Image (tube, coloured by chain):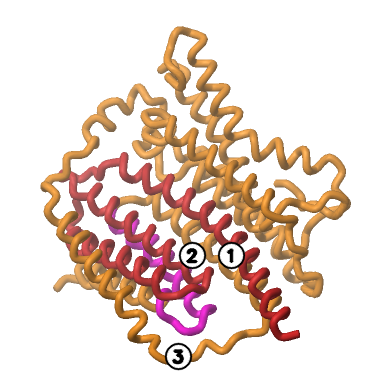
Amino acid sequence: MTIVQLFDALLALLLLWLAWRAVTDAVLFRAVVSFVALGLVLALTWFRLQAPDLALAEAAVGSGLTGALMLAALRRRSDRSSPTPEGPVKGAALRQLPGWVLAFVIFGALSWAVLSLPIPAQGLTEEAHASLEKSGVTNPVTAVLLNYRSYDTLLEIGVLLLAVVAVWSLRVAPRLRPGSPSGPLLEGLLRFLIPLLIITGGYLLWIGAFAPGGAFQGGALLGGACVLVLLGGLTVGPMTGRIVLLRTGLWAGLAVFIAVGLGAMTSDRWFLEYPVERAKLLILLIETAALISIGLTLGCLFYGGRPESGSSDRSSP
Amino acid sequence: MNGAPLELFLLVGAALFACGAAGVFRDAEPLRRVIAVNIMGSGVFLLLVAIAARGGGDRPDPVPHAMVLTGIVVAVCATGVALVLADLSGGEEGDDDDGERS
């Protein structure tokens, strides 16, 4: 057994074990931590499966931000209610039996289905690479996302906006715990980290045209910066017109995307059919707007509600 | 293909999906269900990426990669909304408990 095979086996075992812990651990906090660790191991797995774009996104979004959201929810939960004893309930094992039987059936059916797929898989690899010259970018994943199938991505940006609308409609943001003073050390670290995150986000956006990266990975870093701003208590002053700025930022991605799509129609083309010679510029334009929207959306999801008018607002990056 | 045992990862993907599915039915605690649904999603992503790597040649299929990238971002949005909903429903239950005690 070579070292690479050993690594693969280790990855597979870790994935299974962490998923098991995340589902079955009696202590909720440990389950959340297992889930975050699962995301990091998945990021390694993406790298192993030649999907570095996904590795970046998984580490930042799937593991990092989802984990932050869950931990924040966990804290709100423990703030609100006294911890209930999570001991074994009588007959719990028997009650869970149908669930596990169902899981086993699903596992069997799904494995059979995916293993009986033809090899080599009939994909669109050749087509995707053949048209790469005309797409304006050289990273095939970015080409799929923002050129071949940009309609999907347009709708995805719409889903992001919808999520914020849903969260804002549901409630006013709960007050961040006031009794957490950010010491000078934390503040100093954040003042160093946040610009770094913003620069790295921009770098990922730019490099996404020809290497792993792109608006989603960059936006995730921007979202991380927003979370740090919120956690560090670096909110500035009473909000005066900032909410308008925030709303504009949230809308920007979708608005620019639609505008570019409609713009393409003016010169006798289909919706979102970019002219070949200007594809790179248009993709960069869309991605920049999307980057800002994605970052702000993720920050707003972490904020967990609409900003209360009249109170302090967070600084927008 | 760089020799990654794709059948192994396909099986692990199916197992993650099944494990998450069991978790959804196992526990009524909202946060646990959100975790379980996320694990189901991760299982689906693993299946897609393993299938993408199966295309033969040394280049994986970029289309499933783009789908998974979209999926990861949509999953975090769904998680955000679900957690707010869980918070709200949990709050109401807590109030009910208080009412019963008093």
- Mark 1 is on which residue type? Ala
Instruction: Identify the secondary structure beneath mark 1.
Output: helix
Pointers 1 and 2 in contact (CB under 8 A)? Answer: yes
**In this orientation, does residue B22 appear?**
yes
Task: Identify the element where label 2 is drawn.
Answer: helix
Residue position marked by numbered label 3 in the rendering: A88
The residue carrying mark 1 is B86
Q: Residue at x 27, y 55 (%)?
A: B47
Q: Is residue A39 magenta?
A: yes
For label 2, the crowd category at 10 Å Cα-Cα, with few meaning under 14, some 14 to 19 and many 20 or more, is: many
Which tint is chain A? orange
Q: Nearer the viewer, residue A305 or A271?
A: A305
User: Residue under circle 2?
Assistant: B34
Is A184 drawn above or below residue B38 in the view shown? below
In x, y percent, where is residue A11?
Answer: 30, 69
Q: Main secondary structure of the magenta part?
A: helix
Image-based side of A114 in relation to A269, left or right: left
The magenta region covers: A22-49
Q: Are tags 1 and 2 found on a single chain?
A: yes
* Chain at numbered mark 1: B
Q: Is residue B36 left or right of residue A85?
A: left
